[in-house]
Image (tube, rainbow, N blue to C red):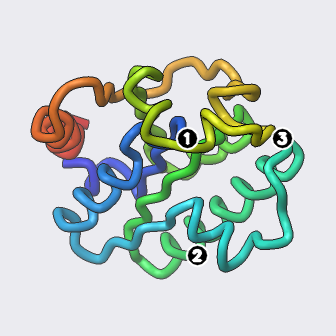
Amino acid sequence: MIIKKFKGIWFYGMSGAGKSIASKFLKKKIKRSITIDGDKVRKYVSFDLGYSIKDRKIQILRVYGLIKLAVESDIFPIASTVYMNKQIMQKLKTNKILLVRITRNFNKIKNRKNIYNNKMVDVIGKDIQNPKLNKVFKIENNKTINFFKKNIERLIHER
């Protein structure tokens, strides 16, 4: 089971990929857990940041700090952000936090999320790409919601 091998989990992927669904689903399954949603961290903690790569790097450092606080309090953190880089990936690995990339077909996302169709800049998946990260566990969210949840359930029990 995931909570026996890891001290937390961090989902990352484009807006609309299913990170929040995965986080909420796991929150119901794992006792003594907390969700650390990147959008909420941005609203309540990182309100001073924009969306440039520089600001996104600061944002994920802050999310990482919140993960560390949760782990030190014996709480299982379930984090989610759109951006990830090698520096944080290495810190997660060192600290036994499972990193999972959630992917979804862009055509299924773009019409649901206004950020992909308007004139916003610094959007992950539109004009900014996440760095290529090797050996990252990946879950695809391209079928039904039940199929996606079954993949998350397998993640809990097989990792």
Q: Residues within 10 Å of mark 1 (few under 14, many from 20)?
A: few
The amino acid type found where label 3 is placed reads Ile
Residue nearest the observer in this picture, 64 or 122 = 122
Q: Kindly report which numbered mark, 3 or 1, lies closer to the viewer in this rendering.
A: 3
Residue at (26% x, 37% y) in the render: 159
Instruction: State if disc 1 and disc 3 touch (CB < 8 Å).
Output: no
Asked if 74 appears above or below 136 in the picture, the reply is: below
Asked if residue 46 lies left or right of residue 101, the reply is right
Res 40 label:
none
Across and down, in percent, residue 57 comes to 79, 48
Residue tagged 3: 53
Asked if 92 appears above or below 158 in the picture, the reply is: below
**Please, what secondary structure does the residue beneath circle 2 have?**
helix
The earlier-in-sequence mark between 3 and 1 is 3
- Distance, label 3 to label 2, CA atoms, is 25 Å
The amino acid type found where label 2 is placed reads Leu
Residue at (22% x, 41% y) in the render: 152
Across and down, in percent, residue 66 comes to 61, 70
**Please, what secondary structure does the residue beneath circle 3 have?**
helix
Asked if 155 appears above or below 133 in the picture, the reply is: below
**Please, what secondary structure does the residue beneath circle 1 have?**
helix
- Distance, label 2 to label 1, CA atoms, is 16 Å
- Distance, label 3 to label 1, CA atoms, is 22 Å
Residue tagged 2: 69
Residue nearest the observer in this picture, 21 or 6 = 21
Q: Quadrant of residue 68?
A: bottom right
Residue tagged 1: 93
The amino acid type found where label 1 is placed reads Lys
Q: Kindly report which numbered mark, 3 or 2, lies closer to the viewer in this rendering.
A: 3
Across and down, in percent, residue 16 comes to 44, 42
Asked if residue 24 lies left or right of residue 112, the reply is left
Asked if residue 116 lies left or right of residue 24, the reply is right
